[in-house]
Image (cartoon, rainbow, N blue to C red):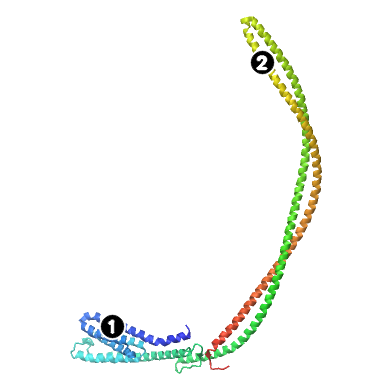
Amino acid sequence: MSISASARSTRESSNEYLDKTNRIMMGVLLGCQVYALALAPWHGTWTSALLVGGGTLAVTIAAWQSNILGEHFRSLIAVAFMVMSGLHIHQSYGTIEMHFSIFVLLALLIAYRDWRPIAVATVVIATHHFLFFYLQISGYPVWVTEPDHAHWHMIFIHAGYVLVEAGALFYLARLAAADAAEGQALAAACEKLTRDDDRMDLTLQLDHDSESSQSFNLFLKQLRALVADVQHQLGSLQQMGRSLTGNAADVERGAERQAAVNQQMFDAMQEMSEATATVAQYAQYAANGANTANELAADSGSVVQRISKSIGALQNDIEITSKAVSDTASQANDIDKVVDIIKDIAEQTNLLALNAAIEAARAGDHGRGFAVVADQVRSLSRRSSESTKDIQQLVKRLQQTSDSARQAMTRSQEAVGECLVSANEGSSTLQQLTHEISQMASQNDMIAASAQQQSVSGDQVVNNLQSVNEIASQNLKKARELSGISDSLHQLSDSLQHQLLRFDSGRKG
């Protein structure tokens, strides 16, 4: 909370405190009336409770709502409290415990921090006791004490206690009033200090002799000295701020130039490193391709050698096959001769079977069985003759096929010979190609290794430049922060100087 807000709050606190105290006292008075109604059935004092208590409450409420009495309303509260105490004593027929309410209600009046309501209440309750006790002992239906204590010395004892409490309350009320006055003086001083938002007069002094006032005056004196010292130190701070601002600007410009140069070096070196890495990569690709070609050439040489061996083996197999075909043709001629012999035998068998059939026919019934056998033999002979014809045809085709195969074998043997010569020549050429590719692969490996080493060195340089660039960036950032801090310091010193101008410490210059 600001000093100005505190002062405004203090200005309103006095009236707020009085209003709050009046509300509390009205609540207590209402409680007294409720208590009077509660006591009414004890001795049938409804009339007194309603007329005296209700009338007192009504008059007090009317005065409170209309504010007709102003500050004197507190004295009316004191009178109403004592009237309620007298009513409660009367309703209880002078019970000694009911007299305690006098002391309780008197003590509550100190909340006003004014001795006058206490004095009014003391006079009212003293008048009540003396007057109503006289009426009680004179036979009137009023009660101040119990019948057993209806003696004047009891009244004087009660009065003595009331006077002692009233005296103590007078003293406490004066102390409270002094504290309140001192608080109001402090509030007025704070209000005067903060009345002008653009200027605060620190030369103010309180005239009270209280300890709080003296402490407040000492505080303002120390504050004046502090403001004067701060103003003096602020001049040095402003000079340092201006010097710092100039130096920070120089550092920032130098850091910017350094960062720009470092960035250019970093970009150029990074491009060179990337180009070297690309060369190394393509050299490695070429080395890998040469190695692959070398391996393929070696594999091709092996394949050609295997093909050459296979062709040689094939040539041998063709020669063997050609010989086998020739043997097959020769054997087919032998089969043809055997078939001719079988054919002659079949024809002779057929003639014999025919003769046998004739002889069987001559023999009549005795030669019937032999005739059947002769027919079967003739049938077999005929079938054998037909089979020999088929075999002769097959053998003839086999001879023709064998001749064709022998001719094809001869041509294949000649082609295989040519292939074998070509394979041997290809194998020799591949061996030379393998040797050349191997040398080229070795050279590419050396180129790739050299380019790779250059790429690694370039990466190291790029990393070092990156570190330098980061340091330069950090320096630039720090320089800008320093420049910002110096600007903020300059603005802060100006703002502080402006704020200090609000304080009038009574010193010039």
Q: Amino acid at mark 2?
A: Leu
Task: Point out residue 170 in the picture as x, y percentages from the top left corner.
Answer: 35, 91
- Residue at 66 percent of width and 15 percent of height: 380
Query: Can you say whether 35 is above or below 382 in the image?
Result: below
Determine the secondary structure under disc 1: helix
Residue drawn at (79%, 36%) of the image: 415
**Residue assigned mark 2:** 380
SS category of the residue bearing label 2: helix
Where is residue 150 drawn, in percent x and y?
22, 89
The quarter of the picture where the C terminus appears is bottom right
* Residue 74 or residue 315, whichever sits in front: 315
Instruction: Choose the circle earlier in sequence order: 1 or 2.
Output: 1
Task: State the image quarter where residue 176 is shown.
Answer: bottom left
Vertical comparison of 431 with 506: above or below: above
Q: Nearer the viewer, residue 54 or 318?
A: 318
The image shows residue 186, relative to residue 386, as above or below, that is below
Q: Amino acid at mark 1?
A: Cys
Residue occupying image coordinates x 72% and y 60% = 278
Task: For label 2, count other residues whose C-alpha is less than 10 Å away and answer few (under 14), some (14-19) or many (20+).
Answer: some
Disc 1 crowd, CA 10 A, few/some/many (<14, 14-19, 20+): many
Badge nearest the viewer, 1 or 2: 2
Image quadrant in which you'd find residue 346: top right
Q: Relative to 257, is 430 on the left or the right?
A: right
**Residue sitting at 67 percent across and 71 percent down?**
470
Q: How many marks?
A: 2
Mark 1–mark 2 distance (CA, rounded to whole Å): 163 Å
The answer to which image quadrant residue 386 occupies is top right
Q: Circle 1 is placed at which residue position?
A: 32
Q: Is residue 332 visible?
A: yes
Q: Position of residue 461 (x, y in %)?
A: 72, 67
